[in-house]
Image (cartoon, grey):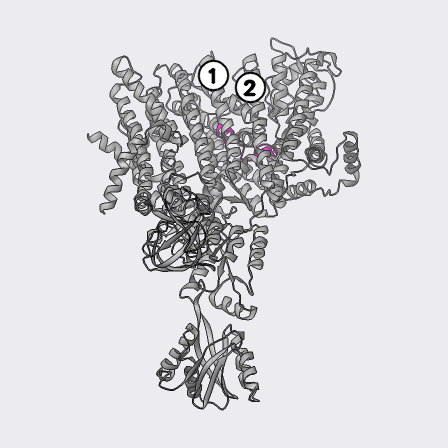
Amino acid sequence: MTLTGIGQILFYLFILLLCVKPLGWYMAKVYRGKYIGLKFLLHPLEKWIYRFCNIRPHQEMHWQQYLFAFLFFNLFGLLLVYALQRLQFYLPLNPQAFPNVPPDLAFNTAASFITNTDWQAYSGESTLSYFTQTTALTVQNFLSAASGMALLIAFIRGITRQNTKDIGNFWVDTIRGILYILLPLALAFSIILTSQGVIQNYKPYEKIHLLQPTTQTEQIIPMGPAASQIAIKQLGTNGGGFFAANSAHPFENPTSTTNFLEMLALLLIPAALCYTYGALVKDKRQGWAILLAMLLIFIPCAGLDYYAEQSKNPQLTSLNLHTNKNMEGKEIRIGVANSSLWATATTASSNGSVNAMLDSFTPLGGLIPLILLHLGGAIFGGVGSGLYQMLLMIIITVFVAGLMVGRTPEYLGKKIEPFEMKMACCAVLITPFIVLLLTAITTLTTSITGTHGFTQILYTFSSMVNNNGSSLQGLDVNTPFYNVLGGIAMLIGRFWIAIPILAIAGSLSQKKNIPATSGTLPTHTLLFILLLISIIIALGALTFFPALALGPIVEHLLFWGNNAHQ
Amino acid sequence: MHTNKKIIKIAIRDALFKLAPQHQIHNPIMFTVYIVSILTTGLFLQAVFSKGDAPANYIFAVSLCLWFTLLFANFAEAMAEGRGKAQAESLKKSRRDIQAKKLSKASRTAKITLVESNELHAGDLVLVEAGDFIPSDGIVIEGVASLNESAITGESAPVIRESGGDRNSVTGGTQVLSDWLIISITANPGETFLDTMIALVEGAKRKKTPNELALTILLTALTLIFLFVCVSLLPFSIYSSIASGTGKVVSITTLVALFVCLAPTTIGGLLSAIGIAGMDRMIQANIIATSGRAVEAAGDIDTLILDKTGTITLGNRQATEFIPAADVTITELADAAQLASLADETPEGRSIVILAKEKYGLRGRSIEELGASFIPFTAETRMSGANLPGRQIRKGAAEAIEAYVKQFSGTIPEFVKKNIETIARKGGTPLVVAEGAKILGVIHLKDIIKGGIRERFARLREMGIKTIMVTGDNPLSAAAIAAEAGVDDFLATATPENKLSLIRRLQAQGHLVAMTGDGTNDAPALAQADVAVAMNTGTQAAKEAGNLIDLDSNPTKIIEVVEIGKQLLMTRGALTTFSIANDIAKYFAIIPAAFAATYPELNALNIMHLATPESAILSAMIFNAIIIIFLIPLALLGVKYKPTTAAKLLRINVLVYGLGGLIVPFIGIKLIDLLLTLI
């Protein structure tokens, strides 16, 4: 590890933390219905949308209605994205005349983008038209992010309200999230990106004559409206790149400035939402405590990943090739520190965009992103979805810790009773179950062999079920098997968890608030944070420890034991 | 000690009986262990008779560990039940069949038919006389009698039961010592207090409480997760055996061992024992909980409503000071006060005599020798006193004495009036003493705060529990007592109505309220409170409204109730934490052992340096089973509870059970492994 590298990581964290309070404060205002600054511009538009869509903004919903709206909205999105891909040949803005996307891939991609996963079994520049990219994918990047945030806000209302079944209006929460938070941020960000050289055009692909012709004399350079999609893919924890190489591609991530800003955007909203949470529950310490818990897991992971990638490759040493770091699969202009930091941030948040090829990371360097996936996206996680998964973990921690202080466990004045526990368990059970099930099926049926093959399969399903979207690119996943199974896995990973989340919100909102006394378990202390971290690790990492032992851990031991099987 | 041995003997027998599937299915965690035990036993038989999943002796050892895990869990539950059962036996003895004298109407002379007590129904009228046993629960409608209630309370001092008022309820199984009663039966067969108590101590009627249910859900979820983990390891292992080229697949027996070690069997096995033991601790404290829910709710209480009299103060006021009028000596006043109280049998009166004797050396004299006649207290005059030859001494409330001296054209001097006010302001009761028209001075009667109660309230405050004193006194004296006793708040000039509305108001603010009561007029408030402790001496209405009944009728005991409730929850939490923390060490024991054949490199994870894969797996399993036995005393006695803030409690318990749970198995497994290697 170099001093510059560590310095860059620390600088990144510093800037990220600087943004938490102002953005978090602003988002809290938005979700309270108090618009600042942008009111005169956007309020008429907001009102027009309500009128046009026949939404009564003051009509609140019970949790079942909220859930129905959420599911209906996403089902509509799923069908639309599927249809646009299946019909893209007949639609405009298709200068390369790409054919219609095959059904299994179209289903996988539609499921992927409505679930905020952005798993890409397709290759952007050779499969999708500009029309599909912008109207299907970019639009869903906004919608899936905003609806994830809406769910979080509904959950927070469950905590703060009492004696009511109302947890807000899904349409209002979603529209406000898009209009006042995602659109302005994405607009500003895409303008900055364009200024740095990220392309934004609708031109046909360009044919370029090579300066140093080899067997070939010309190369096709893909074009397209990249900047608008990249801004939201980073901000909305989506991660679906315009080009297959994602942010390793110079048109997506041309300079060190764009690299820094795109990396900042990975964690910007998830981190700031912690502050929003504190503000909305009227106890800022709670928000800071959550952020601290996230950082206490994130920072060691980032450090360890950087350490792993900065070490020499013993396999190359044995071939008398001396390297002092693992540069395979990394952009020279980005370097090890920023590649490993990005890898950690993109898997901690459920973003999944990459600026280096994760498959080429050392076993230990690849283990960290995999563990972060297994922590259920609770460490930063997706916009909205990360924090509500974290709140599930808090509910479970509060339960165990609350018993230890001799009270019926309560969180922020709300009792945690069998119903909440049942729902929380439903939510946390499903991810390991689906990941292990699909990995088991695949290992028994696959033609892939080798220890790393197991890691690749495990990573693939971990990424999809946890709605991350990053991948170990060595595995060819554009097959009907992976497309269909993976598509279903992504839908379950997103929507199965949404049900218990809203059910808990609905149950909590009906409960009375118990005033805090010195007999109440404090949930902002360092001890509680450490306990929370232990529970997250116990539930996330312990579940996958045996699988990891047969994958990256044994790979690591083999790697350093000079005894590679692959 | 002898009874303990007997309990253990019975518990060992019961542990075997409890292996029946219909019993096991009640506990989802242990039921999965039960299923895999049968599976492994099947694998063992397969290995004996044909080619097995693993060497037969290894499978045998694993299945033995599994069955012992189950037996130990059963034993824990049987032990917890054992203590209750012993108590139930003695209670059952009091439920002998009693010949009841059923009356045709509510009169002692009415026609009597003899019926068996178990044929009595609610509404029947029975006569009981000296020497009879009360056939069933009921209300006294006529008569006064002394009863021996030791069968229920363990207290052999006789108690008085009479019709009307707050002492009219009788319990089946108790014995009439003198006189007679006519009782209206209130319970149908099988629903009497004694029946309820027997069922409760036997644990037969035990339903899972909300917290226990929530914990069972969490533990079941964890069990399911680990089940997925272990099942999925089989395909992973098959894949890895090809990937590594060694071709060695993990045995099903090993996966079963891994599963049982990871599943929260420690807490799962002890869960019902903890619940039963919690109820049992209530019974030890002579409190009958009508449901386990009430015991748990006691732990959640954050507001305690306490009656002043009998709980915070001793029942009676006592004279503490004589304050003479300007021209009277203190001895003169003391002498007059004593004379006026010589024949006064009220506690207040007696305390005046004693004060005069102790402080001024005035011996009590016989009222006859002095030729005096005693004037008793009446509601009309509101004074008492004595008429001696030539002297008329009176003592009473200021207004009453003022009216009395007025007839001799006397008044209360300003100086005395000032003293009266001072005493009232301090929360005391001023008694004015007069002889004829002359005011001699004031006696200060004071509420005596029970010893140690202030410290107890301070501890409650630290636990986050607010105390509210309820009294019929005026706000001024109430405030003074409240300040002296150190309660947080008080309700003065209390009536049943404003007591009830106080509870409702507190509950609306989200508080959980506990209170004690014994009178019929307490019943509405008791029914409204979240935890209501009714005194056993109280009325039937109060007992029905309460969810806990204190057989000792000690109003201060509610504080213990809270502590027992908290201890119950803490024990569950602590053992859950311990159980989960144990998994780390077990992983490090089993994973390298299970997959070392596939990938020898994984031996790097064998950080405990366990001897062989078999010994590693068996050590983890033996540890997993034995830890249940080691934790039985903790489950039965509960974790140590010290009243303090939640933050401190958490720190202590996380340190002991969290960190302890992390470290202990590393040591335990290593030690067992060393022992196994020696064998």
Which quadrant: the C terminus of chain A? Answer: top left
Q: Nearer the viewer, residue B593 or B32?
A: B32
The quarter holding residue A189 reads top right
Mark found first going from the N terminus, 1 or 2: 1
| Above-or-below relation of A288 to B19 | below
Q: Residue furthest top?
A: A215
Q: Amino acid at mark 2?
A: Gly
| Above-or-below relation of B413 to A299 | below
Kind of element beneath mark 1: helix
Check disc 2 and report the residue beneath it.
A486
The quarter holding residue A201 reads top right
Q: Nearer the viewer, residue B553 or B639?
A: B553
Image mark count: 2
Q: Which residues are magenta?
A: A369-387
Kind of element beneath mark 2: helix
Q: Is residue A476 visible?
A: yes
Q: CA distance from mark 1 to mark 2?
A: 12 Å
Is A380 one of the magenta-colored residues? yes
Q: Is residue B601 visible?
A: no
Q: Position of residue B453 (x, y in %)?
A: 43, 63
The quarter holding residue A483 reads top right
Q: Position of residue A290 (x, y in %)?
A: 54, 41
Q: Position of residue B663 (x, y in %)?
A: 34, 39
Q: Position of residue B531 (x, y in %)?
A: 48, 50
On residue A441, which mark appears?
A: 1
Judged left or right of residue A506, residue B587 is left
